[in-house]
Amino acid sequence: MKALLYDMGGVLVRTDHEAVFRHWSNAAGEPIANLRRRWRAREAYRAFEVGSIDFEEFAGSLSRQLQITLSLEDWRDGWNQLLAGTFDDVLAEAKRIGDAIPQCIFTNTNPVHEACWRQLYGHRLTAFRHIYVSSTIGLRKPNAKAYRHVADDMGFACREITFLDDNADNIAGAEAVGMQTVHVTHPAVAERFLASASTRRRSAPSRRARGLPTAMAASATPRSASAATPYSSRTRIRTSTFTARNPSAEPTSLSICKWTMQTPQPSGSWRPVRK
């Protein structure tokens, strides 16, 4: 592992889709259940995220599909309700890694959300060398061209990058171009992976100093994700231990398989196209 690439929503930034509908429901005087049922904005959503349409066009599409009429300001205010804070422990681990491993973000997003999260959370994202925004580069995950574009701009081969995302389709897309992946099905997955990567990075020189063979230095297995912080009895955890076994790798490199934690989703929870 020579570089880290993060998704934003669901990995670094909390999202609240229900808050979006609540705002629009209140502004329009329309039952929220009707808005959930009518949501079919995938095509316009994707076009907005690659910069093909502007917010006014996107809001017009929403108005037709949700069958409500709002001012552009209400559409925007509701849209920005999606951003609901940050995963502070994950950001703390990324900050701890610092410049030891190049870190960037690649997010499927749009100019309205970008302006909002830069204002709200920009000061929390200083550990990342660059933030790749789909609406700026004109490409979105899981398009293979998007991953290759980002990898090329970062200056690394896809196989040298470990990608963290909460969306299974985006993970599959990254794996298809050769990236190593961490499927973040719970924030603790990212937190523990980063903590382990940071520990390995710091401890690698001492292994070399003790004269351990390169293959041994690269093959230590971190503790299982289920061995640390306790979870409530309602949380089901499934982990597959990741182990570096690459004899040709540098002692500080780490080959990632999959590390996932699964938690039950609330019944009736809504998921649009994930960021």
Image (cartoon, rainbow, N blue to C red):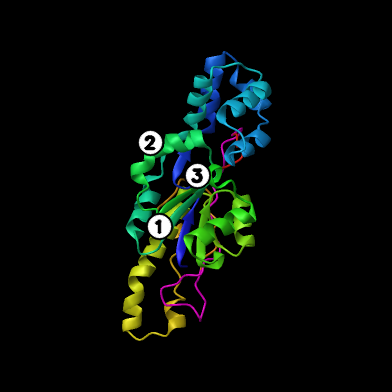
Residue sitting nearer the eye, 165 or 74: 74
In this picture, is 232 found above or below 249? above
Residue position for label 3 = 10
The answer to whether any part of residue 272 appears in the image is no
In this picture, is 237 found above or below 212? above
Residue position for label 1 = 228
Q: Position of residue 246 (x, y in %)?
A: 52, 77
Q: Position of residue 82 (x, y in %)?
A: 50, 33
Q: Amino acid at mark 1?
A: Ala
Label 2 to label 1: alpha-carbon separation: 35 Å
The residue most toward the top is 29
Q: Amino acid at mark 3?
A: Gly
Q: Position of residue 251 (x, y in %)?
A: 42, 77
Residue position for label 2 = 119
Q: Amino acid at mark 2?
A: Gln
The range drawn in magenta is 243-269
